[in-house]
Image: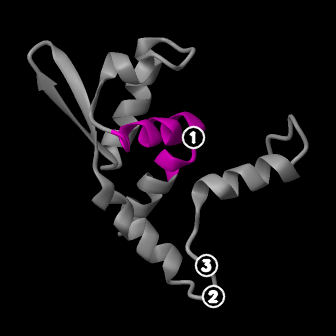
Amino acid sequence: MSNDLDTVFAALADPTRRAILAMLLEDDMAVTDVAEPFEMSLAAISKHLMILTRAGLISQEKRGRVKWCKLEPDALRAASVWMQGFGQFEPVNLDAFERFLQAELPAGDDA
């Protein structure tokens, strides 16, 4: 289980991948539609999607000529259970935590 958690948390560590997951909350999306709002190549987006797929956070399916991405919300269950196991903490809102860190850390600090 530890390796699975490591894979999920590593996938969630990247802001682009978190943005992709947020987009997929709405509905399944074609890979080209996922790539549209990002200023990076389709190959770079495909690498992010592969990492999310390996972590089990999304699935990809070919429909005709188009590859579609679908959120797999159950994949976050183990991570959520692990975080809630600390009991003394409120449920974690990762987006709020990221905003807090951005506000607190000086710009350009990649620590």
The x, y position of residue 90, in whole percent, is 61, 78
Is 101 left or right of 86, judged from the image as shown?
right
Residue at numbered disc 2: 88
Other residues around mark 2 within 10 Å, as few (<14) / some (14–19) / many (≥20): few
Amino acid of disc 1 = Asp
Give the answer, above or below, for where 1 lies relative to 76: below
Give the answer, above or below, for where 6 lies relative to 31: below
The residue tagged with tag 3: helix, strand or loop? loop
Q: Earlier in the sequence, mark 2 or mark 1?
A: 1
Amino acid of disc 2 = Gln
The x, y position of residue 79, in whole percent, is 44, 66
The residue tagged with tag 1: helix, strand or loop? loop
What residue is at 32 percent from the left and 55 percent from the top? 73
| Residue 22 magenta | yes
Give the prevailing secondary structure in the magenta stretch. Answer: helix
Q: CA distance from mark 2 to mark 3?
A: 7 Å
Q: CA distance from mark 3 to mark 1?
A: 23 Å
The x, y position of residue 67, in whole percent, is 21, 22
> What segment is highlighted magenta in the picture?
10-26
Q: Are marks 3 and 1 in contact (CB under 8 Å)?
A: no
Quadrant position of residue 3:
bottom left
Residue at numbered disc 3: 90
Residue at numbered disc 1: 14
Residue at the farthest bottom position: 88
User: Of residues 63 and 86, which is closer to you in this image?
Assistant: 63
Is 93 left or right of 107, judged from the image as shown?
left
